[in-house]
Amino acid sequence: MASNTRIPPAEITGIYGALIKLMSRKMLGDVPDAVGVVWHNRKVLNFSFGLSRKIQKWDACDENLKSFAHMAVASLVGCSFCLDFGYWQAHNKGLDLEKAREVPRWRESDVFTPLERDVMEYAEAMSQTPPTVTDELSKRLLEALGPAAMVELTAFIALANFMTRNNVALGLESQGFSAACNLKPLAEPTGRPGVTPAS
């Protein structure tokens, strides 16, 4: 597959490279372009892998809520790679796929609970520049989740911004992981008052 990334992917070589390619193909069915791009700087690659492993150990906040939050950030920022990967990951983790596919149009969809809507609103508010998080929204989430889960959700959304913005800047796009699992296409995002969709 031809890559449209802004930095051409490097050739992934050596024993470490062979292991990464093997693991990627086993987990995803393919080696993401992202791996080849970040292969240019092994320290950044190792940091990204290490961060992902550490985040997976966080367990104070519901996985569905974190999944919806990450996909809401990806939809707002315009990261097709993260949206597709998040949908695929929801499938593999046994999360709620009907809701995951609706995240790009969560404001219009009727499948979400009030708490899930608050989580996605919080994710979008944190992702604005400057952030537009309100005391009222934070209070509702704190009452519903408790302090530990609220701290985890906030950090998770901040890291989702790091990942999505990094991918968009590097020109990383969807590689069709969800389509390879025969999942329904993601719902199309719609315009939201006061929010300019990323192109």
Image: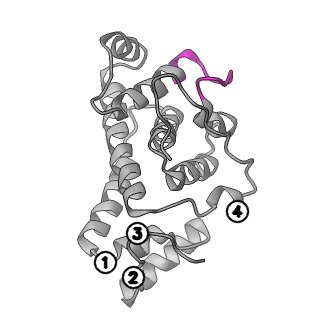
Decide: is 115 above or below 57.
above
User: Label 4's element?
Assistant: helix
3D distance between C-alphas at marks 4 and 1: 28 Å
Location of the N terminus (image quadrant): bottom right
Name the residue beneath numbered marker 1: 40
3 vs 1, front mark: 3
Looking at the image, tell me whether mark 3 or mark 1 is earlier in sequence order: 3
Query: What is the three-letter code of the residue carrying label 2?
Result: Ala
3D distance between C-alphas at marks 4 and 3: 25 Å
Decide: is 53 above or below 136.
below
Q: Which mark is residue 180?
A: 4
4 vs 1, front mark: 1
3D distance between C-alphas at marks 2 and 4: 25 Å
3D distance between C-alphas at marks 3 and 1: 13 Å
Residue 68, percent from left and from top:
52, 35
User: Label 3's element?
Assistant: loop
Query: What is the three-letter code of the residue carrying label 3?
Result: Arg
Q: Is residue 16 left or right of residue 102?
A: left
Name the residue beneath numbered marker 2: 10
Residue 28, percent from left and from top:
58, 66
Name the residue beneath numbered marker 3: 6
